[in-house]
Image: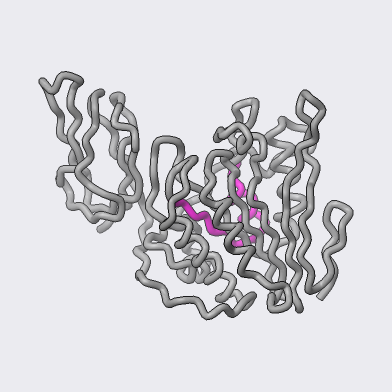
Amino acid sequence: MTNIEMAGITVAPRERKRLELPVARLPTQTMLSLPVTVINGIEEGPRLWLSAAIHGDEINGVEIIRQVLEKINPDSLHGTLIAVPIVNIFGFIEQSRYLPDRRDLNRSFPGSPRGSLASRLANLFMSEVVSRCTHGIDLHTASDHRTNLPQIRANLLDAQTHRCAQAFGAPLLIHATTRDGSLRQAATKQGIPVLLYEAGEALRFDAEAIQVGVEGVLRVMDVLGMVQLGLPAKTVTPVEVTQSKWVRAPRSGILHLKVILGQTVDKKQLLGIIYDTFGETSCQVCAPCNGLVIGYTQNPLVNQGDGILHLAVLN
């Protein structure tokens, strides 16, 4: 097992260290740094990164990483774990999805050392974290005012990625192509298998989403041969799909949903009713296909065209 050098600090085998990667100064000249925990194991093996809060208001992943780190002992780890619980430190402080210039960090990869703040942060993460790893797990939640069923999005056509996705144990696996500028796209281009975990909502801790996430990360580490923790057996057989569809509001008004996360629905089944403010008129929203409810808005006030419910398409 070899030493790991990062930010001028050496992490020897059987060691755990907290590092700070300098990012940029605030207008007050206060330096903001990227917090990284490196755990170097007892022998060579996979090098896995865990990342969360690429969108600064998506905090479930921060807690998932904290709990995972509590369970990993460098004296029994095969390989290396690099954990970055808060990637978008600017957004995290401001409780915002975005960076100060309103850029989306997850549309800025692989970045550039001379680009925008988002581009520079993306470049730093790629050069200091991704380039050292063989596998990655990126943790997310739904955007503001929405919630998601625990789910893995990944390239399920890649055998190694599919194996890790199956091991994770989320109730849903979605074969998803990569978005331009995303961390998953940038890492995939370097030949690194990446899982993207989505669960819960922004600025809220969801106990179930966190538990599924913690156990899922540890199961992936188990299947990669990094740890042996005697984890409980998976409680669900994941549903695999290749397509999802947003159901949009046909009119503006107040939405009353009639379904819950994880519910299977049939084509033309009633999903919700949109009323006007005075209750004088209403509009039914029905399922456009057979599907599984994997996300929906938490805000009952909707405008015409808003995405109000997300379905995984079932044949």
Q: Is residue 256 left or right of residue 225?
A: left
Q: Nearer the viewer, residue 217 or 114?
A: 217
Q: Residue at x 62, y 60 (%)?
A: 136
Please state the horizontal and vertical placement of residue 193, each as a whole percent of the image: 59, 62
Q: Is residue 43 above or below residue 270?
A: below
Q: Is residue 54 left or right of residue 38?
A: left
Q: Is residue 280 left or right of residue 101?
A: left
Please state the horizontal and vertical placement of residue 117, each as a whole percent of the image: 71, 32
Please state the horizontal and vertical placement of residue 266, each as a whole percent of the image: 17, 52
Magenta segment includes 42: no
- Figure quadrant of the C terminus: bottom left
Q: Which residues are magenta?
A: 181-199
- Figure quadrant of the N terminus: bottom right
The single residue placed furthest to the left in the displayed view is 280
Q: Nearer the viewer, residue 146 or 129?
A: 146
Q: Is residue 223 above or below residue 212?
A: below
